[in-house]
Image: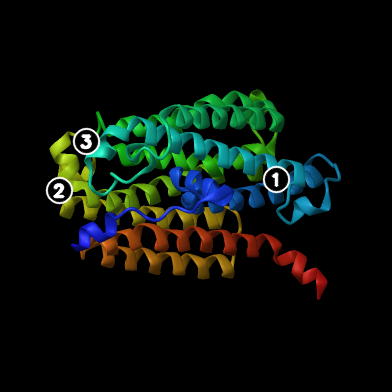
C-alpha cells in the first residue's frame, strides 16, 4: 500500500450507541470546534468583565460578582455554547452535502460518510435543518440582537461552502464565518436590542475590541486554510474549484498565507492593548507567533502528513493558548483576592 493509500484508507468504525455518536461527530468534524470556540469563549469572558464595569461604574447597578471575572451566568453560558455548536454543525453538514460529489472524486475525501454511503442524504439534511433551528431558538433566548442577526450568521457560515465555485478568495469567506463566533459571543453578553447594539456607549462597551479580534480570526483562517488547500491543489485545478492556491500557485499562496498570519499577530496585539491585557497575554502572543512560524516551516515540506499536522495540531494549540492567556488575565484579580 502506498503512503497516499495508507493515509486515505477507511478508518474502522465502532458499533453501538457510542459508534453512532462518533460517526456523526466525525461527519461534522466536531474535533475542529477547537478552532473557533476558544476565541468565542475568550470574547465572552472579556465582554462579561467589561459589561460588569459598565453596569457598576456608569449605570450604578450591582451585577452578579461572577461577571467581573468573565462568567456571564450559567444560563447565558449554556446558550452561547448551544449557538456555537449548532451553527458549526449546520455549516459542516451543509458543506458535506453540497461537496459530496467532489468528495467522491477526490481520493483524499472519498471515504467521507456521504460518498461512502455511511450516512444518507436525508439524514444529513435533517441534521443541518435541526441545527439551524436550534441555533435560532438559542439566539432568540439570548437577546433580540442575536435573534435578528442569527439568519445573517447562518448565511455566512453556510454560504462559504459555495464560494470555491466562483471566487479565488474562498478563504476570506471561511475566515468571516469563524470570526462571527467571538463577535457573536460579545454581542450575546452585551445584550439588548438592535438599536442598543449600535448606540454610542463608553469605549469598553463598543464593538471595537470584538471587531479587532474577529478580523484577527479572519486573517488567521485565511493563512491556515491556504495551507490546508495545498493538499488538493491538483484536484481542485482539474475540477475547476477555486482558491488562492489554484489561482496563484502554491509558492505565492504560501507567501500570502504568511503575510496573513503576520497581520493576525498585529491585530491580536492590538486586541490585547484595547482590553488592557498584560504579561500573561504577551507570553501567549509569543507562543502563538512561534506556532505560526513552525506551521509555515512545516508547510514548505509539502508532505500531506505534515500539512495535516500544521493544519490541525498547531492551530488547535494557537486557539487554546489564546483562550488560556485571556482567561488568566480576566481571572487574575480573583486569584489575587484569595491570597
Q: CA distance from mark 1 to mark 2?
A: 43 Å
Near-viewer residue (60 or 3): 3
Please give the residue where the numbered disc 3 appears in the rendered image: 241
Which image quarter is the C terminus in?
bottom right
Res. 215 visible in picture: no
Q: CA distance from mark 2 to mark 3?
A: 13 Å
- Around disc 2, counting alpha carbons within 10 Å, would you say few (fewer than 14), some (14 to 19), or many (20 or more)? few
Name the side, left or right, on which 74 lies relative to 319.
Answer: right
Circle count: 3
Q: CA distance from mark 1 to mark 3?
A: 39 Å
- Around disc 1, counting alpha carbons within 10 Å, would you say few (fewer than 14), some (14 to 19), or many (20 or more)? some
Q: Tell me residue 129's x, y (percent).
A: 52, 26
Q: Residue at x 75, y 49 (%)?
A: 53
Q: Residue at x 47, y 55 (%)?
A: 268
Near-viewer residue (275 or 92): 92
Q: Earlier in the sequence, mark 1 or mark 3?
A: 1
Name the side, left or right, on which 91 lies relative to 76.
Answer: left
Q: Nearer the viewer, mark 2 or mark 3?
A: 3
Please give the residue where the numbered disc 2 appears in the rendered image: 249
Look at the numbered disc 3 and give the secondary structure of its residue: loop
Look at the numbered disc 2 and give the secondary structure of its residue: loop
Please give the residue where the numbered disc 1 appears in the rendered image: 77
**334 up-or-down from 69: above or below:** below
Q: Tell me residue 254's x, y (percent).
A: 23, 54
Which image quarter is the N terminus in?
bottom left
Q: Tell me residue 105's x, y (percent).
A: 22, 39
Q: Quadrant of residue 194?
A: top right
Amino acid at each position: 500500500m502506498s503512503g497516499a493509500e495508507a493515509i486515505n484508507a477507511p478508518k474502522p468504525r465502532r458499533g453501538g450507541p457510542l459508534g453512532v455518536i462518533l460517526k456523526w461527530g466525525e461527519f461534522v468534524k466536531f474535533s475542529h470546534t477547537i478552532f473557533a470556540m476558544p476565541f468565542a469563549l475568550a470574547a465572552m469572558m472579556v465582554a462579561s468583565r467589561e459589561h460588569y464595569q459598565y453596569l457598576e461604574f456608569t449605570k450604578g447597578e450591582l451585577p452578579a460578582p461572577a461577571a467581573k471575572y468573565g462568567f456571564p451566568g450559567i444560563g447565558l453560558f449554556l446558550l452561547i455554547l448551544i449557538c456555537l455548536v449548532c451553527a458549526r454543525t449546520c455549516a459542516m453538514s451543509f458543506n458535506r452535502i453540497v461537496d459530496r460529489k467532489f468528495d467522491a472524486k477526490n481520493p483524499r475525501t472519498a471515504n467521507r460518510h456521504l460518498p461512502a454511503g455511511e450516512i444518507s442524504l436525508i439524514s444529513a439534511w435533517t441534521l443541518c435543518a435541526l441545527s439551524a433551528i436550534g441555533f435560532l431558538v438559542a439566539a432568540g433566548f439570548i437577546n433580540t440582537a442575536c435573534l435578528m442577526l442569527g439568519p445573517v450568521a447562518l448565511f455566512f457560515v453556510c454560504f462559504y461552502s459555495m464560494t470555491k465555485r466562483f471566487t479565488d478568495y474562498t478563504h476570506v469567506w471561511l475566515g468571516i464565518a469563524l470570526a462571527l463566533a467571538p463577535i457573536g459571543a460579545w454581542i450575546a453578553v452585551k445584550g439588548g436590542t438592535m438599536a442598543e447594539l449600535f448606540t454610542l456607549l463608553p469605549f469598553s462597551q463598543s464593538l471595537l475590541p470584538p471587531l479587532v479580534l474577529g478580523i484577527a480570526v479572519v486573517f488567521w483562517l485565511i493563512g491556515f486554510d491556504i495551507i490546508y488547500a495545498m493538499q488538493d491543489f491538483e484536484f481542485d485545478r482539474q475540477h475547476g474549484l477555486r482558491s488562492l492556491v489554484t489561482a496563484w500557485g502554491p509558492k505565492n499562496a504560501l507567501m500570502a498565507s504568511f503575510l496573513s498570519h503576520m497581520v493576525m499577530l498585529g491585530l491580536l496585539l492590538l486586541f490585547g492593548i484595547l482590553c488592557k491585557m498584560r504579561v500573561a497575554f504577551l507570553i501567549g502572543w509569543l507562543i502563538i507567533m512561534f506556532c505560526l512560524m513552525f506551521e509555515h516551516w512545516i508547510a514548505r515540506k509539502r508532505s500531506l502528513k505534515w500539512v495535516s499536522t500544521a493544519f490541525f495540531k498547531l492551530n488547535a494549540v494557537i486557539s487554546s493558548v489564546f483562550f488560556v492567556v485571556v482567561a488568566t488575565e480576566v481571572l487574575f484579580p480573583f486569584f489575587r483576592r484569595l491570597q
